[in-house]
Image (cartoon, rainbow, N blue to C red):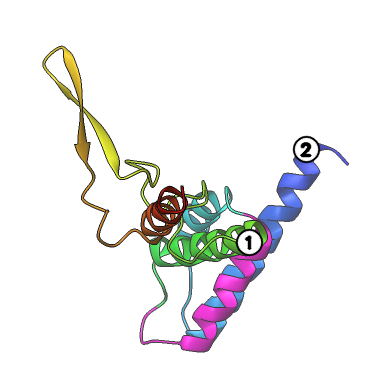
């Protein structure tokens, strides 16, 4: 199957989701709006776009959902599936860290002039990975 056919079938599927939402919200959506929604949503996996559209239809509302809301919901579904697949805690990022700044070490690097200094990260009190690692290292050190 050629790339252009894949693109058109994906675009058709996105268009069907837009049409279903338009019916659910009893709105007429013009061609320019459809194009913007399609272009905005197209980087996301089709399953996430469809699942987000279904959630938006079920939750309803007075107005047709903005594309940013639809995109954010689909992106959230992708992140949730990634966490489930990687078996990460709910607060972890897809990379596996709760805090990308310190990568759960509790220490951040900061450039001051021409020097790099290490500082305590502000996540220490709330970062469960950091707390778990700190606790386990204390147990190892106290058993020596």
At x 76%, y 39%, the residue is 4
Is residue 18 depicted above or below 130 in this figure? Answer: below
Q: Quadrant of residue 72?
A: bottom left
Q: Camera-side residue: 93 or 76?
A: 93
Q: Residue at x 68, y 64 (%)?
A: 47
At horizontal 53% and vertical 59% (from top left) the residue drawn is 79
Spot the residue most to the front. 144
Of mark 2 and mark 1, the one earlier in the sequence is: 2
x, y percent for residue 110: 20, 29
> Residue tagged by mark 2?
3
- Comparing 129 with 79, the one in front is 129
Q: Which residue is mark 1?
A: 14
Quadrant showing the N terminus: top right
Residue occupying image coordinates x 39% and y 62%: 128
Residue 53 or residue 98, whichever sits in front: 98
Q: Quadrant of residue 67?
A: bottom left
Q: Position of residue 35 (x, y in %)?
A: 52, 53
Q: Residues within 10 Å of mark 1 (few under 14, many from 20)?
A: many
Residue interval drawn in magenta: 45-63
Disc 2 crowd rating (10 Å Cα; few below 14, some 14-19, many 20+) is few
**Image position, residue 96 (x, y; %):** 51, 50
Q: Secondary structure at mark 1?
A: helix
Looking at the image, residue 41 sits to the left or right of residue 137; the answer is: right
Label the magenta part by its dominant secondary structure: helix
**In the displayed structure image, the side of residue 98 where residue 39 appears, left or right:** right
- Asked if residue 23 lies in the magenta stretch, the reply is no
């Amino acid at each position: 199957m050629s790339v252009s056919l894949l693109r058109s079938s994906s675009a058709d599927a996105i268009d069907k989701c837009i049409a279903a939402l338009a019916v659910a919200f009893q709105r007429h959506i013009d061609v320019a709006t459809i194009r913007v929604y399609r272009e905005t949503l197209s980087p996301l996996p089709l399953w996430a776009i469809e699942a987000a559209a279904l959630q938006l239809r079920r939750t309803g509302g007075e107005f047709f959902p903005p594309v940013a809301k639809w995109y954010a919901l689909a992106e959230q579904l992708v992140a949730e599936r990634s966490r489930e697949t990687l078996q990460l805690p709910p607060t972890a990022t897809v990379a596996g860290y709760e805090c990308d700044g310190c990568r759960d070490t509790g220490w951040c690097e900061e450039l001051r002039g021409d020097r790099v200094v290490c500082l305590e990260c502000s996540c220490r009190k709330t970062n469960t990975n950091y707390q778990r690692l700190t606790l386990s290292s204390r147990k190892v050190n106290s058993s020596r």
